[in-house]
């Protein structure tokens, strides 16, 4: 039997074939997101399919919003995989939304965004904040929209946060006992936390700050210190799921938001200490000025138009429509087609500035040699040629 599960606000369904046993599990994990289930509509293209495999309690999982191999998974991981696909399906249907790979937790009435950094413990910290009474909007996929100006609104999807198992023995016993007592489905890898009074689908709050996590293995007192906004941009640069949206539009809104909001680094070794540090340090928020700018809508990127390939030795210049934004100490560029965002190192940034008018690699190298008379000219020319070739390949100059 084939069923379609429809999530409120999402036209494309999740298709279950011989997998109706997953409906209650899906209802537990996404309890805050209203769903309806009915017979599959052959005319409707699903965003994700789960099909029963020959082996008991195993399911074939296939995403229809991104190209990747199918997987055969157990029930919990199958539902987990389907929920991850929503991060691609949501912005595909709503051009006001991008999805970040980040956690979002409510502190003092605003959302603190924890960008995904490998092994930094964002999911565990999110659960620790939940234990302390702070609602978790998401621990992994964060839908965000920009209703005007520098205001960024995070939307809850009503999905339970999850912990990776086994929990480290270094975590406080009180937290381990609490996590074990919270109801929720799980397997050997994950435990979902079905928390009471959790944020529901559609709940929205403005972003208050971005916090980069720096978890230490050894004991240390937790500290929260300001860092330049490019620290958050670098953490988010490869951590958004909305890959079909125009990177220039994304760069524009993120540059404005990161310049307007505080960016911090939380260094910590102990979970309870980290929670207390955040509660003390983020109790008040700066006032973000309101503007009358219209809501941001993100264009689709153009992946069909190949970058131009100027002849060797040709004069090059910045392409019309390329987006350049300075965030903190970094220069970031997006190509006119909106395929990607690139951070420039200091030499590449200097070359970019020189290419506001047509110039060859030899001419650029000569200008830089005059600015840096101590540099080895042969090495400088080699570096300039390589960087200009990279700018051409990225579609930034031509």
Image (spheres, grey):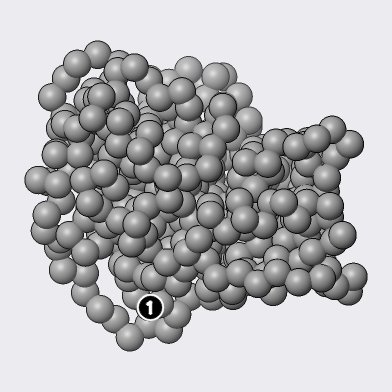
The answer to whether residue 383 is above or below residue 71 is above
Question: Between residues 4 and 276, which one lies in front from this camera angle?
Answer: 4
Tell me if 375 is positioned left or right of 221 in this view. right
- In the image, taking residue 290 as reference, residue 190 lies left or right, namely right
Let me know if residue 126 appears in the view: yes
The residue located at (84%, 55%) in the rendering is: 17
Q: Residues within 10 Å of mark 1 (few under 14, many from 20)?
A: some
User: Above or below — where is 381 with respect to 398?
Assistant: above
Task: Identify the residue at image location x=64%, y=39%.
Answer: 77
Q: Residue 68 falls in which quadrant of the image?
A: top right
Tell me if residue 215 comes above or below residue 183 in the rendering: above
- Mark 1 sits on what residue? 148
Q: Quadrant of residue 71?
A: top right
In percent of width and height, residue 117 lies at 43, 34
SS type, badge 1: strand
- Residue 314 position in % (x across, y down): 72, 45
Depth check, front residue: 274 or 338: 274
Residue at the spot x=43%, y=50% of the render? Answer: 194
Foreground: 290 or 274? 274
């Amino acid at each position: 039997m084939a069923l379609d599960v429809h999530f409120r606000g999402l036209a494309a369904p999740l298709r279950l074939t011989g997998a109706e046993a997953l409906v209650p599990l899906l209802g537990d994990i996404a309890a805050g997101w209203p769903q309806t289930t009915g017979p599959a509509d052959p005319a409707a293209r699903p965003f994700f399919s789960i099909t029963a495999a020959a082996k008991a309690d195993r399911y074939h999982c296939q995403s229809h919003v991104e190209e990747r191999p199918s997987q055969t998974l157990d029930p919990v991981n199958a539902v987990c995989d389907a929920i991850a696909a929503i991060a691609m399906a949501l912005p595909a249907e709503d051009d006001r939304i991008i999805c970040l790979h980040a956690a979002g937790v409510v502190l003092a009435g605003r959302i603190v965004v924890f960008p995904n950094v490998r092994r930094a413990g964002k999911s565990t910290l999110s659960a620790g904040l939940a234990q302390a009474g702070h609602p978790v909007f998401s621990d992994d996929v964060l839908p965000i929209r920009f209703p005007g100006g520098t205001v960024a609104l995070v939307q809850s999807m009503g999905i339970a946060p999850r912990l990776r198992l086994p929990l480290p023995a270094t975590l406080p016993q009180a937290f381990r006992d609490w996590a074990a007592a919270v109801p929720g489905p799980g397997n050997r890898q994950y435990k979902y936390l079905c928390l009471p009074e959790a944020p529901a689908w559609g709940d929205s709050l403005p972003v208050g700050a971005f916090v980069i996590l720096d978890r230490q293995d050894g004991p240390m007192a937790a500290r929260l210190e300001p860092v330049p906004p490019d620290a958050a941009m670098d953490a988010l640069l490869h951590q958004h799921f909305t890959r079909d949206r125009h990177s220039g539009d994304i760069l524009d809104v993120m540059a404005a938001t990161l310049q307007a909001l505080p960016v911090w680094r939380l260094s910590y070794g102990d979970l309870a200490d980290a929670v207390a540090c955040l509660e003390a340090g983020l109790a008040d928020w700066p006032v973000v000025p309101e503007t009358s700018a219209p809501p941001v809508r993100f264009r689709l990127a153009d992946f069909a138009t190949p970058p131009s390939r100027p002849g060797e030795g040709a004069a090059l210049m910045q392409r019309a429509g390329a987006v350049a934004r300075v965030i903190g100490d970094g220069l970031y560029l997006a190509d006119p087609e909106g395929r990607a965002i690139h951070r420039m190192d200091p030499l590449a940034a200097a070359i970019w500035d020189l290419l506001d008018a047509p110039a060859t690699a030899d001419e650029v190298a000569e200008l830089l040699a005059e600015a840096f008379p101590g540099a080895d000219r042969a090495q400088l020319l080699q570096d300039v040629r390589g960087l200009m070739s990279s700018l051409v390949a990225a579609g930034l100059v031509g």
